[in-house]
Amino acid sequence: MYSSFKFKHFHFFIIFIFILHVFAATPILSFNNFLESAKSPEVFDWMISIRRKIHENPELGYQEFETSELIRSELDKLGISYKHPVAVTGVIGFIGNGMSPFVALRADMDALAMQEMVEWEHKSKVPGKMHACGHDAHVTMLLGAAKILKEHEKEIQGTVVLVFQPAEEGGGGAKKIVDAGALENVTAIFGLHIAPELPIGEVASKSGPILAGSGRFEAKINGKGGHAAIPQKSIDPILAASNVIISLQHLVSREADPLDSQVVTIAMFQGGSAFNVIPDYVTIGGTFRAFSKQSFNQLRQRIEEVIVGQAAVQRCNATVNFFDESKPSYPPTVNNGDLHEHFVNVAVDMLGINKVDSVTQPSMGAEDFSFYQEVIPGYFFMLGMQNASNNRFDSLHSPYLTINEDGLPYGVPLHASLASSYLLKLHGPK
Ligand SMILES: [Zn+2]
Ligand SMILES: [Zn+2]
């Protein structure tokens, strides 16, 4: 009895080993395969040419017409179906069996209104516009992932949704993508940003808040202009605006919890045009940042109260504009804890444990990726694109930014693996 029981179990054991062997022998969605494919000359050279084409022709938010066209023509060549236009220039592609579950990967497409100062063969051909935030690389890597995922389409246990979104730089393109219903039924979304200070083959992220919520404001402080030598006949908006600025600096230093990082910066001050004339009004403007919605809303309310109240002390009246329609505030970018675990597993498997910084320092920068995270779990991470040969410090939004194209093949398999293995996980035992 005892021995036959053992024998029976031995049989089950053999069957189990056989099943394991069959699964192990099937090269489904292997992370290393993805990395190898992305590094192959066929994929790498194709990506370089796409990235350079986009870099030469930068387009600002909601004007990414040619970039969008290029994306669609590559998707056509790959046989990938898509929706267009979504949010003006956006393209939403689909790879897989067309059925649930759906997982999304995002790339932003827009450039910045600045003049490229780097002299190289593929410098921006549009004066005053430059891909200085690396969104040309983001589009390229998502197309790379699309190519590799398409080759494995039959193995995808659900559908990967490719989100090519417009207007990340201030235009809140992500919000328009959400409003267009493009993420309905999507379970999770992943996004990445190039990091010119991080070495190639390395990634960095964290669970919870990683980027701040960001808002902008402009205030008009109205006084009464007059002769600069007869101030008693005027109401001086320059002095009022100066006091407003000083008072605004007390919000973070005196009202915020010192352990809850916040920023208020006045970056614009415009008023007056002559040495001997007190102007009628002054315009000031700036940005404010916080890591929680509560702190952000509190800061916004106090900015308005301080501007209006402090202007009144000097007999001026003030109006404050937060650009809710044209430049919506970005919520804080907050990474989902379960997706963080998934990301760390995928990235460590692919790159090795010492290449994955999973507790990176958050930054007061902002991202409209946060709009996706307001409606579904989302995860955002930094991808190394350091240019080791460059001794000048490269930073995003710098007219001197050069990115190391050798980093492109790493974003591709990360995108592809994050999505495909997430779908596999959803199908696995709960
Ligand atoms: Zn940017
Ligand atoms: Zn960016």
Image (cartoon, helix red, strand yellow):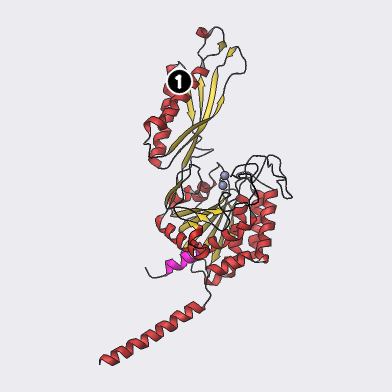
Our reading of the magenta stretch's main secondary structure is: helix
Image quadrant where one finds the C terminus: bottom left
298 displayed left or right of 194:
left
In this view of the protein, which residue sits in the foreground, 99 or 21?
Answer: 21
Residue 81 visible in image: no
* Residue 194 lies in the magenta stretch: no
> Mark 1 — residue?
311
Image quadrant where one finds the N terminus: bottom left
User: In the picture shown, does residue 52 fall above or below 62?
Assistant: below
Magenta-colored span: 419-427
User: In the picture shown, does residue 331 fall above or below 345?
Assistant: above
Amino acid bearing label 1: Ala
Residue 293 visible in image: yes
Around disc 1, counting alpha carbons within 10 Å, would you say few (fewer than 14), some (14 to 19), or many (20 or more)?
many
In this view of the protein, which residue sits in the foreground, 358 or 188?
Answer: 358
User: In the picture shown, does residue 409 fall above or below 288?
Assistant: below
What secondary structure is found at the residue carrying circle 1?
A: helix
264 displayed left or right of 10:
right
In this view of the protein, which residue sits in the foreground, 219 or 88?
Answer: 219
Residue 359 is situated, as x and y percent measured from the top left of the image, at 44, 52
- Which residue occupies 49% across, 50% down? 178
Residue 27 is situated, as x and y percent measured from the top left of the image, at 53, 75
Residue 304 is situated, as x and y percent measured from the top left of the image, at 43, 28
